[in-house]
Image: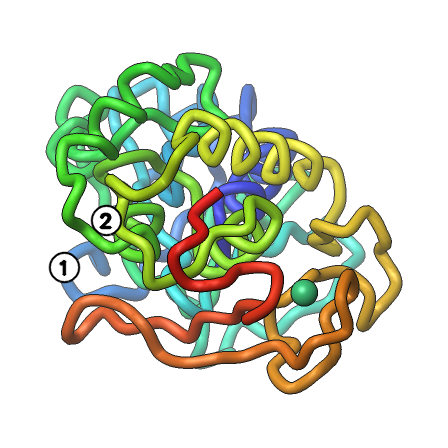
Amino acid sequence: MPEGDTVLRTARSLHRALAGRLLTGSDLRVPEYATVDLTGQKVTEVVPRGKHLLARTDAGMTVHSHLKMEGSWSVYGPHRRWSRSDHRIRAILANVEYTAVGRLLGTVQVLPTAGEQDVVGHLGPDLLGSDWDPAEALRRLKAAPERSIVDALLDQRNLAGIGNLYKNEVLYLKGINPAAKVGDVADPAGVVELARRLLSANTGRWSQTTTGNTNKGARHWVFERSGRPCRRCGAKISSARLGEAGLERITYWCPNCQPPGDVG
Ligand SMILES: [Zn+2]
């Protein structure tokens, strides 16, 4: 699942290709917006908000997209080949130089830029935003001390940008057992700050690493390492689907480095 850093890199890539240029074509392959034509509008900017992407035009319109589980945007120069008949395509935005192609996007909609709050107004402070507000993120987290920490970190209304990868890695690095409740965590500010550091460190590269090592198989401490030895203590990494009913996500932890009852 794409996380805040992936969305930020995607926004930068789209911004470089689209901003300041007139659209020469648009093709939104979702029933509600299939007849919308943005040709002739100039894209002013493409910005991320949490895991949402907002492409704004000088006509006061915004193309809002969300990558959800499988989505991606690719940018093609004039000589790159791609197939327009690809059934995975949900959106195409083109100018004379570049074509941006969104595939398997979870959400595509066109709305007035003035109405963006309706789709992103619920989000908590953006970990990678220029308006990052750690005090507000902490206030929102601590407002529900009985909530499981695994759910609270993924809830984009608390703070926007953490997905399952960073949830798992932050809890490991802080020695927090995933069964802990928010109110049990000794240093929630440290948890939030570490999440921001890890996301920030990956905004310049596509191979997300939390270990600092970008080699395949060496990038994560516990994420997707079930049954493998802990890089610190050698204990077998555990995994289970944890979370509120209906929102369970696979969670990885070291039973030795993150013992129950010890919550960092
Ligand atoms: Zn360990």
Q: Residue at coordinates 14% horizontally, 39% vertically from top-left?
A: 144
Callout 2: SS: strand
Against 78, is 251 above or below? below
Instruction: Look at 53% across and 60% down and name the residue there.
Output: 258
Q: Image point 66% across, 69% down: which residue? A: 82
- Give the side of residue 72 with respect to residue 124, left or right: right
- Pinpoint residue 110: horizontal percent, then vertical percent: 23, 42
User: Residue 219 is drawn in which quadrant?
Assistant: bottom right
Q: Which residue is mark 1?
A: 32
Image marks 2 and 1: residues in contact by CB distance under 8 Å: yes
The residue type indicated by label 2 comes to Gln
- Name the residue carrying label 2: 109
Task: Categorize mark 1 by other alpha carbons within 10 Å: few (<14), some (14-19), many (20+).
Answer: few
State the residue at coordinates (41%, 68%). Answer: 69
Residue 115 in the image: above or below residue 27: above
> From the viewer's perspective, is residue 213 above or below residue 22?
below
- Whether disc 1's CB lies below 8 Å from ligand 1 is answered no
Q: Amino acid at mark 1?
A: Glu
Give the foreground label among 2 and 1. 2
